[in-house]
């Protein structure tokens, strides 16, 4: 519970502080064996009660096994947080599909990344 409260406080600080225009770093790990790492530099935007950060991202295959596709891919990530709720929504392209995660910001919490053809274990956090 303390981790969730700290993550929400960190996310609220990153999104809700007026004048905070510098990019923040987001990191994520996903895959059944944690074989992919996501890294993004996002900048906050604010529209009404909904907070959003967006920015360029890089996904790297860091697993030991071979896989189909590139070892590194680039794209754009969007993270939404409504008000003071602890739930976020993350959307980004991966492997030719649009993927979405709805859950909490926590390195330890593993949720489901839902892509067009599969559901993959996923965790996301803000790095300082």
Image (spheres, rainbow, N blue to C red):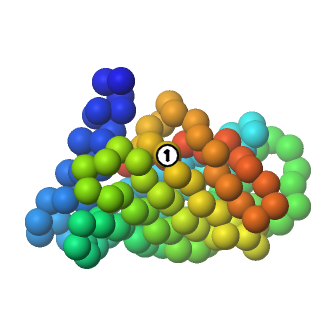
Residue found at x 48% / y 72%? 56
Relative side of 49 to 34, left or right: left
Pick the front one: 50 or 124:
50
The number of numbered discs placed on residues in the rendered structure image is: 1
Residue found at x 43% / y 62%? 79
**Residue 117 is at least partly visible in this image:** yes
On the image, the x and y values in percent for residue 11 come to 30, 49
Q: Residues within 10 Å of mark 1 (few under 14, many from 20)?
A: some
Residue found at x 48% / y 36%? 107
The residue sitting at the top extreme is 1
**Residue 127 is at least partly visible in this image:** no
Relative side of 104 to 63, left or right: left
Residue found at x 19% / y 59%? 16
User: Does residue 15 lie above or below 122 as drawn?
Assistant: below
On the image, the x and y values in percent for residue 7 come to 33, 39
Label 1 sits on a secondary structure element that is strand
Picture quarter containing residue 71? bottom right
On the image, the x and y values in percent for residue 41 come to 40, 65
Quarter of the N terminus within the rendering:
top left
Pick the front one: 103 or 33:
103
Pick the front one: 8 or 49:
49
Residue that carries the numbered disc 1 in the rendered image: 103
């Amino acid at each position: 519970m303390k981790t969730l409260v700290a993550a929400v406080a960190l996310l609220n600080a990153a999104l809700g502080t007026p004048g905070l225009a510098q990019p923040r770093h987001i990191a994520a790990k996903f895959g059944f064996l944690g074989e992919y790492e996501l890294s993004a530099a996002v900048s906050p935007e604010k529209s009404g009660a909904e907070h959003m950060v967006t920015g360029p991202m890089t996904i790297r295959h860091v697993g030991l096994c071979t896989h189909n596709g590139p070892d590194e891919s680039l794209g754009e990530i969007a993270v939404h947080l409504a008000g003071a709720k602890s739930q976020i929504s993350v959307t980004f392209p991966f492997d030719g599909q649009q993927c979405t995660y709805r859950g909490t910001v926590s390195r330890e919490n593993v949720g489901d990344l839902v892509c067009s053809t599969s559901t993959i274990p996923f965790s996301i956090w803000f790095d300082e």
